[in-house]
Image: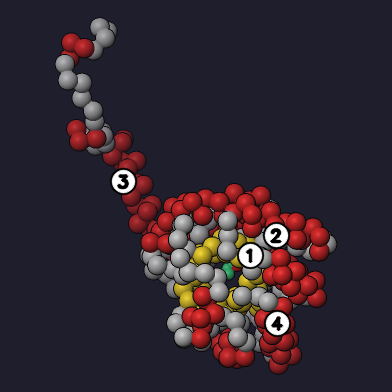
Amino acid sequence: MLNINDLAKMKMNKEKIAMLTAYDYPSAKHVEAAGADVILVGDSLGMVVLGYSSTTQVTVDDMIHHAKSVRRGATNTIVVVDMPFMSYHASLEQSIMNATKIFQQTDAQALKIEGASEEIITLTERLTDGGIPVVGHLGLTPQTVNVLGGYKVQGKDEAASKKLLEDANRLAAAGAVALVLECIPQELGKLVTEEIDIPTIGIGAGADCDGQVLVYHDLLQYGVSHLPKFVKTYANFNLYGTQALENYVQDVKGNNFPLEEHSYRIQKKDLLPKG
Ligand code: KIV
């Protein structure tokens, strides 16, 4: 299995990093079998698995519950787990306690944290120092969608792109092992990737990032309807999965399931209880 620090070697060797989200045992098995380098147990699980309207309802216990099943499904892949909404903002002590709980209980290789405020830089240093690798997340940070005013492209003007570049440098200096860049112009993704030593993993940040990440349910069109521009779909489970389910319902109603090959037989009829 790769080590979280191998991602830096991949950047140096210009080997692209493939990251995918997973949220449970079967999706983790699929992603590991596909050969992804990293699994992200994203708090996007709130939207694509639990049906919430944003990630802000997801709790520490939700993350632990899902990440544990991912770990059971993917024993040979790096697993990164999101720290959910407000679990790292109350105080440094509380943030460290939440991080420790998630890290210990899920057997993850790293935790992902959104933003780069002074508090988050300090938290990144403290967790790294204590032995918990941190993956940063800049650009569109979904936990603050209500402050950002919606799911919009970030870093579009000079001031915003300068700030993002500075934040990326500060996170790298604080010890972050990788940085997710979400929904920013391709040019800015390239600039950050060239500027910092740690690997960048893009989602809507262009082709120049050191790696890419997509959400499992988006890529497979599995239960999702609206898809952002940056998603490439590789299957249509909504269509073909639903067709398969409809076929089952029709088979049951039309007496076409179960058939002989799905049924068990008793060897001697006289062994049956008398009715
Ligand atoms: O929660 C998530 O799935 C994420 C990715 C979109 C990077 O943070």
**Which residue in the protein does label 3 denote?**
247
Q: Is residue 261 left or right of residue 183?
A: left
**Which residue in the protein does label 4 denote?**
173
Marks 1 and 2, the one that precedes in the sequence = 2
The picture places residue 208, in percent across and down from the top left corner, at 51, 87
Marks 4 and 1, the one that precedes in the sequence = 1
Give the number of the mark in front: 1 or 3: 1
Place residue 270 in its image quadrant.
top left
Marks 4 and 2, the one that precedes in the sequence = 2
Assess mark 2: CB under 8 A from ligand 1? Answer: no
Dot 2 falls on a residue whose secondary structure is: helix
Mark 1: amino acid: Leu
**Which residue in the protein does label 2 denote?**
99
Dot 4 falls on a residue whose secondary structure is: helix
Please name whichever residue, 170 or 48, is drawn nearer the observer in this view of the structure.
Answer: 170
Marks 3 and 2, the one that precedes in the sequence = 2
Furthest residue to the front? 130
**Which residue in the protein does label 1 denote?**
111
- Mark 4 neighbour density, 10 Å: few (under 14) some (14–19) many (20 or more): some
The picture places residue 123, in percent across and down from the top left corner, at 76, 69
